[in-house]
Structures are given as C-alpha cells and as structure tokens.
C-alpha cells in the first residue's frame, strides 16, 4: 500500500466536504413551508367547519411533514430500502388504525341495534 500524501489528502477532503445541496433548494422548501403554513392559518381565518376543515388541516400538515423529512432530514437522497424501512411501519399502523375505527363503528352500531337506543345511556334506578 502506498500512503502518499496525495492519496491521503484526497480522501480526507472528500470526507470533510460532504454532500452539499444548493441553497436554492432550501429557499424553495422554506417558501413552500411558508405557503402551506399560511394556508393552514387561512383555514381558521375563513372559519371553515366540519370535515372540510379537518381534511385541509391534515393535508397541509402531512405536506409540511413530508417536505421537512424529504429535504431537511435528507430522506430524498437515501436508498429506497432505508426509506421503506422508516416509512412503512407508521403507514402500516395508520392502516391498522383505520381498520379498527371501521370495526368500532360496526360494533357501536350493532350494540344500538341489538340492545336498543337506551343502551348507551346510564341505567336509571
């Protein structure tokens, strides 16, 4: 092996510099996060109610989290296997929670049908 100063120098500088992303990328993401945050505040300012309100808030929240994870946590430049290892377990939990919510609605509806409307109320003595 030859440990010449040139060979050692090129390896150490490459390691010290690391991967650099253009500053424009960070400014674009910052502007997008600002726009999404403004849209979230607009939902409250417009006094939207019901399912539309919560759907918009959750969509904006998910988009902001995705931008932060992809760019600032450098997930966009990772290998696909690592992305799957990090993102699939929470997505699986969300899917299982959705199934549980559907099942709980079915169970509640069945109790009302079988036991009557007064079954949910406290028994009177």
Image: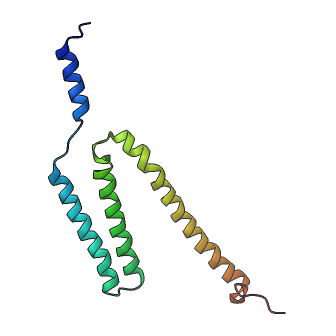
Residue depicted at 30% across the width and 51% down the height? 72
Residue 103: image location, x then y, percent: 59, 68
Corner quadrant of residue 19: top left
Residue at figure coordinates x 31%, y 85% from the top left: 45
Q: How is the image coloured?
A: rainbow
Q: Is residue 65 left or right of residue 123?
A: left
State the count of labels. Answer: 0
In the image, 28 versus 11, the foreground residue is 11
Indicate the position of residue 63 as horizontal and vertical percent values: 32, 63
Question: Which residue occupies the extreme right position in the image?
Answer: 125
Q: Quadrant of residue 65?
A: bottom left
Query: x, y (%) of residue 55?
Result: 38, 74
Q: Is residue 106 above or below residue 81?
A: below
Residue at the bottom extreme?
Answer: 125
Q: Quadrant of residue 35?
A: bottom left
Point out residue 93 in the picture as x, y percentages from the top left corner.
51, 56
The residue closer to the viewer here, 11 or 88, is 11
Quarter of the figure that contains the C terminus: bottom right
Which residue lies at the image location 60% right of the left edge and 71% below the top edge? Answer: 104
Q: Is residue 102 left or right of residue 43?
A: right
Examine the rendered structure and indicate whether residue 8 appears above or below residue 19. Answer: above
From this view, report whether residue 27 is shown above or below residue 122: above
Query: In the image, is 101 to the left or to the right of 51?
Result: right
* Quadrant of image for the N terminus: top left
């Amino acid at each position: 092996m030859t440990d010449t100063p040139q060979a050692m120098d090129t390896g150490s500088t490459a390691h010290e510099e690391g991967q650099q992303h253009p500053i424009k990328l960070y400014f674009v993401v910052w502007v997008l996060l600002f726009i999404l945050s403004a849209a979230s505040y607009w939902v409250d300012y417009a006094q939207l109610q019901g399912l539309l309100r919560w759907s918009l808030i959750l969509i904006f929240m998910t988009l902001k989290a995705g931008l932060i994870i992809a760019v600032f946590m450098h997930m966009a430049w990772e290998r696909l296997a690592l992305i799957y290892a990090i993102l699939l377990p929470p997505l699986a939990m969300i899917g299982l929670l959705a199934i549980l919510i559907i099942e709980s609605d079915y169970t509640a509806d069945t109790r009302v049908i079988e036991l009557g409307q007064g079954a949910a109320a406290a028994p009177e003595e």
